[in-house]
């Protein structure tokens, strides 16, 4: 079975809120291979934004490094669509590129 994780669920887990207990259980099951957990890159970006807003940039970046170790597969079809949009409309991706955190899920672009 596959679960799709959203930003609010990830934040509840990270912040140890009561709703995060179910997320922790699912992550434990995903760690054993019993289930799969996926998350869109957009939701991951929303979670990172929420952490920056609530906990400041340095703390948010540290927390996101821990998220890299969780058994979550990041779905990144957005990058391909963004590239097609850039080609079609001849626009810069500079504002988008620097809005993403630097982690395994968001590797630096050259």
Image (cartoon, rainbow, N blue to C red):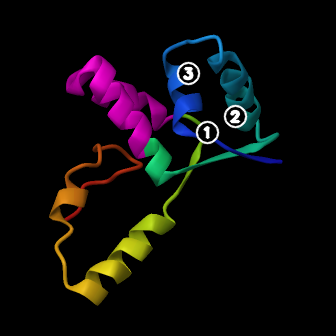
The image shows residue 105 at horizontal and vertical percentages of 41, 49
Question: Of label 3 and label 2, which has the lower sequence position?
Answer: 3
For disc 1, the marked residue is: 71
Q: Which residue is mark 3?
A: 12
Quadrant where the image shows the C terminus: bottom left
Circle 3 sits in a helix, a strand or a loop, which is it? helix
Q: Which residues are magenta?
A: 45-69
Q: Determine crowd level at label 2: few under 14, some 14-19, many 20+ residues with C-alpha closer than 10 A.
A: some
User: Is 63 included in the stretch rendered in magenta?
Assistant: yes
| Mark pair 1, 2: CA separation | 6 Å
Tag nearer the camera, 3 or 2: 3
Residue carrying label 2: 31
The count of marks equals 3
Q: Earlier in the sequence, mark 1 or mark 3?
A: 3
Classify residue 65 as left or right of residue 73.
left
Which of labels 1 and 3 is toward the front? 3
| Residue drawn where x is 38% and y is 25% of the image | 63
Label 3, label 2: how far apart the Cα atoms are: 19 Å
Image-quadrant location for residue 28: top right
Tag 2 or tag 1, which sits nearer the N-term?
2
Image vertical order of residue 49 relative to residue 3, above or below: above
* Residue 71 position by quadrant: top right
* Mark 1 in CB contact with mark 2 (< 8 angstroms): yes
Prevalent SS, magenta region:
helix
- Measuring from the top left, give residue 1's x and y in whole percent: 83, 48
Figure check: 13 above or below 50: above
Does dot 2 land on a helix, a strand or a loop? helix
- Any magenta on residue 106? no
33 left or right, relative to 49: right
Instruction: Say which residue appears at 55% left-offset and 21% top-offset.
Output: 12
Mark 3 touches mark 2? (CB < 8 Å): no
């Amino acid at each position: 079975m596959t679960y799709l994780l959203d930003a609010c669920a990830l934040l509840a887990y990270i912040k140890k809120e009561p709703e995060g207990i179910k997320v922790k259980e699912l992550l434990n099951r995903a760690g054993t291979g019993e289930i799969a957990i996926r998350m869109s890159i957009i939701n991951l970006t929303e979670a990172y934004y929420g952490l920056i807003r609530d906990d400041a940039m340095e703390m948010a970046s540290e927390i996101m490094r821990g998220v890299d170790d969780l058994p979550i597969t990041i779905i990144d079809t957005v990058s391909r669509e963004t590239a097609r949009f850039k080609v079609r409309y001849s626009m810069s991706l500079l504002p988008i590129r620097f809005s993403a955190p630097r982690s395994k899920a968001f590797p630096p672009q050259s």
